[in-house]
Amino acid sequence: MIMFDDFETKEDRFEWHRTSLARLAEIEDEFMMLIQARDRLLKELTSLKETLESHRRQGALLNLRAAELLDRLARRADKAEDNDVLIPEERELINKLNASRRQLERDVLATERQLKIAQFEAKSLTELLEELEDQVAELAVDLEIEKDNAFNERN
């Protein structure tokens, strides 16, 4: 009966060791997938930041053009005696500037939302990676203890 208990204990240890190694392999696969997802997310974050910076540059350019137009109109208004200060091309330019400004504001808001979402996803992914690292460390410690116990029993 003692031999049967020893055999069962060894079988139990072997099974535990096998399942631990299988779980370690699963965690490694998850870890690699998460690393790839993180890399894609970092590329997306970089792209979103570049897009946002581009929108901001476009906004600054629009503001400059609008300021130049308003300055020109103010000078003309000072010189003009009639009430119709704007020529049709200037009205069209003002309308285009306003439409571009509104579209740019929408683009900036959408990009900022995407950036916040991507940053949240990156934070969540980082936390998940840390949890997996902790699990791997725990399993590694358990496996090392089991290895030491098996070595001690042999000697």
Image (cartoon, helix red, strand yellow):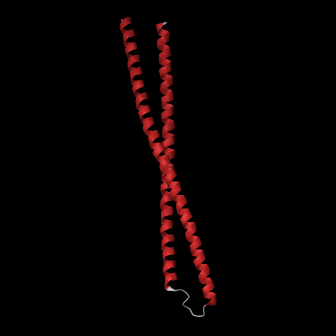
Q: Give percent across and percent down for residue 58.
A: 54, 65
In the depicted structure, whether residue 111 falls above or below residue 135: below
Q: Position of residue 118 (x, y in %)?
A: 48, 51
Instruction: Establish if 93 lies above or below 79.
Output: above
Comparing 121 with 7, the one in front is 121
Give percent across and percent down for residue 46.
51, 51
Q: Residue furthest bottom?
A: 81
Q: Residue at x 37, y 10 (%)?
A: 7
Quadrant containing the N terminus is top left
Residue drawn at (60%, 76%) of the image: 68
Q: Looking at this view, is 115 or 10 the one in front?
A: 115
Count of numbered labels shown in the rendering: 0
Which residue is rendered at x = 49% and y = 78% of the image? 95
Q: Where does the image place residue 103, in percent across and percent down from the top left? A: 47, 68
Quarter where residue 17 is shown: top left
Nearest the eye: 61 or 126? 61
Using the image as rendered, state which of residue 151 and residue 9 is in the foreground. Answer: 151
